[in-house]
Amino acid sequence: MTSLFKTSTAYVVSSAAILGVADIVFETVAVPDKTMQYLIAAILIGFPIALIVSQFFNKKEETDISTEESKSIDKLNKEDKKITASGDYIQKIAVIPFINLNKDEDGAFLIDGIVEDLITEFSMIREIEILSRQTCFNLREQNLTNEDYRNQYGLDFIVSGSIRAVGDRLRISVELSETLEGNVIWSNKYDRVKDDIFDIQDEIVRKITISLIGEIEFSSLKRAHRKPTENMTSYEFLLKGKEGHHKFTKEANIEALKYLDSAIEADANNAQAYAWKACAIGQALGRGYIEYSDENIGRVLTLIDKAIEVDQNDFEAHRMLAEVYLTMHDFKNSKKSGQKAFQMNPNDPRVISVYGEALLREEEIEEGITHLEKAYELDPIPQGQTTSDRRLGALLLAYYLKEDSENFNSTALNLVNYDLRSWLLNIDIHLKEEELYQDKKWYKDGVEEFGESDWSMEIDRFHLNNKPLEGKLLETAQNHSI
């Protein structure tokens, strides 16, 4: 309407000016009598034509501007937000460890276990992105503002609450708040017996999910088939075993195995107890707490098989099986198990990481890198670690296999300490690029720490699935041994 008014006004003013000039000219110049009439008729006929032409160009201009603005907005959305295939924005949330109102250490493991289970439940919903367990628990004492949550972690929503244990009863308060204004979206209080804890978890996840993304088919999560146990005693032993496993010391590992045995004794159908016992034994093998032998590897496989037999939907069991197959150089089955775990839980950084590692060994390098970068983004400092070196080391191998020296070199700069594999790969990268490295600190430190290693055994532990490359790296390593 505004453009039509402007065009009409301009046309009338111009026409009046033309007629005024024509009147003066026609008085001094001899012209036919009907010339003025013809001119007026032409002006009248031209008026609607001028409006039509003007509107056409205005619409074209608006369309061009709208298209450019739309492209700009789409670009910003793709750069700043995570978008699903359907075009929906994925809400990002964190579960802050609940406050222990009892202030007792004995009940802390139960409260943290409940929170950990909530994190796991949310991580299995593809329409929601959640911070990893480690990152969530790191937020416990930080007292961040809503602005901090948004700027530092990109969070849209926070789940928080408190728990008080009174005898065999639990009093739980929980709320969902958005970080933009700090408004509470949903809240509830529960006063139930401990045996109802899984039902409470179900309701919390369901209510929050509905609040964030509307009604979804919650039954598709198959939660009823993933309850670790109906036996509360077995569940508490399971949580104590997981707590000990997460401490990563030899003493805590021994205690964890005792608790997990007690969990199995209390309920022989507690699938997660078998899976986590396998993980605890794997931890002991990896850290040298027990002998690395075929017998102990067999124990791990037997426990995982039992966990899957009891509950085929336990992603932890499939994740651990992927780890074991990787260690055994059975890369095809490692990928298969990793893929199963990923399909069940696409947001767990441990699952994403081991699946990425398996993909690398099956020469699916690009997809493997995508998963390893995602694991690093979700959980840069894995549980039990104090730096990002473990995640970065996995990425270094990925970039090395891709022969992407630019990303390799930029990633290596972020390492706090080199492990043996990263050190050797870095040497090989420098040799390929004909760059000097003998005077660099990382190299000298590595010679002192790794120079007398059993290189044949160590390179075998790289699990490369590439014999010529293993031979090449062995030659490089032997040339740099003391």
Image (spheres, rainbow, N blue to C red):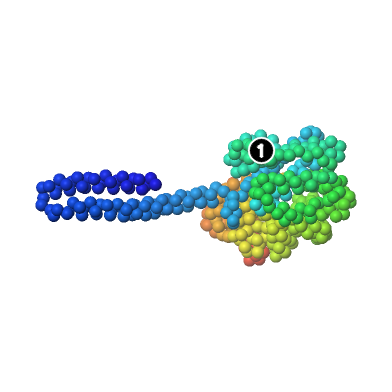
Q: Position of residue 72 (x, y in %)?
A: 47, 50
Residue at image point 69% right, 60% down: 339
Given residues 227 and 6, the one toward you in this image is: 6
Q: Residue at x 79, y 55 (%)?
A: 225
Q: Is residue 327 left or right of residue 374?
A: right
Viewer-nearest residue: 281 or 413 = 281
Q: Secondary structure at mark 1?
A: strand
Residue 223, above or below 197: below
Residue at image x 64%, y 37%? 183
Specify whether residue 456 is in view: no
- Specify few, some or many for label 1: CA neighbours under 10 Å numbering under 14, 14-19, or 20 or more: some
Q: What type is the residue that disc 1 sits on?
A: Val
Marker count (numbered)? 1
**For residue 153, above or below residue 366:** above
User: Which residue in the protein does label 1 denote?
Assistant: 184
Foreground residue among 127 and 333: 127
As drawn, the residue found furthest toward the right would be: 265
Residue 319 lies, in percent from the top left, at 73, 56
Depth order, front residue of 109/373: 109
Residue 141 visible in the current orientation: yes
* Residue 180 screen position, x and y as percent: 59, 39
Left or right: residue 196 versus residue 86 is right
Residue 397 in percent (x, y) is at: 62, 56
In the rendered image, the vertical position of residue 99 relative to residue 123, given as above or below? above
Residue in view at x 39 percent, y 54 percent: 60
User: Residue 351 falls in which quadrant of the image?
Assistant: bottom right
